[in-house]
Image (spheres, rainbow, N blue to C red):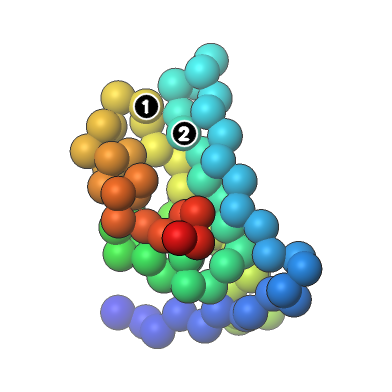
Amino acid sequence: MKEKIYKEPIKIEEETTINVLYSENILAIYTNKVKLQKQLNKLLGEPTREDKIKRSIVGSMWEIPLNDKTKISRMVLKANIFEL
């Protein structure tokens, strides 16, 4: 497996968004926090989309079907989304 290179964002530009798209039956998660990207990569698998600048990953997005309750519960319980 190829090693991924992440680019650390400026502290004030860090963001994580979680959107529930009811019409598409999808939970969409986007983050540019490196630590959270690595956690979600382990828990949820490869992201649906990776934003890159040259070879560095600057943001990742996962789209999880709402009926995939195991992935959603694993993400809520094990990923440090809320920085607690």
* Number of residue marks: 2
* Amino acid type of the residue that numbered disc 1 sits on in the rendered structure: Leu
Q: Looking at the image, which residue is at 28% across and 40% down?
A: 73
Residue that sits furthest to the front in the current view? 84
Q: As displayed, is residue 67 above or below residue 1?
A: above
Q: Looking at the image, which residue is at 76% across and 66% down?
A: 13
Split into 4 quadrants, where in the image is the C terminus? bottom left
Q: As displayed, is residue 19 above or below residue 17?
A: above
Split into 4 quadrants, where in the image is the N terminus? bottom left
Q: Judge whether residue 57 can be spotted in this image.
A: yes
Spatial CA span between label 2 and label 1: 6 Å
Q: Is residue 76 left or right of residue 18?
A: left
Q: Looking at the image, which residue is at 26% across and 32% down?
A: 69
Q: As displayed, is residue 36 above or below residue 22?
A: below
SS at mark 2?
A: strand
Q: Quadrant of residue 31?
A: bottom right
* Amino acid type of the residue that numbered disc 2 sits on in the rendered structure: Leu
Q: Position of residue 36 (x, y in %)?
A: 47, 65
Q: Is residue 32 left or right of residue 66?
A: right
Q: Position of residue 70 (x, y in %)?
A: 22, 38
Q: Judge whether residue 51 can be spotted in this image.
A: no
Residue contact between numbered discs 2 and 1, judged by CB atoms under 8 Å: yes
Q: Tell me if mark 1 has few (under 14), some (14-19) or many (20+) residues whose alpha carbon lies within 10 angstroms of its own.
A: some
Q: Which residue in the structure is indicated by mark 1?
A: 66
Q: Position of residue 60 (x, y in %)?
A: 54, 59
Q: As displayed, is residue 63 above or below residue 50?
A: above
Q: Which residue in the structure is indicated by mark 2?
A: 27
Q: Looking at the image, which residue is at 48% across and 72% down?
A: 35
Front-most of residues 2 and 39: 39
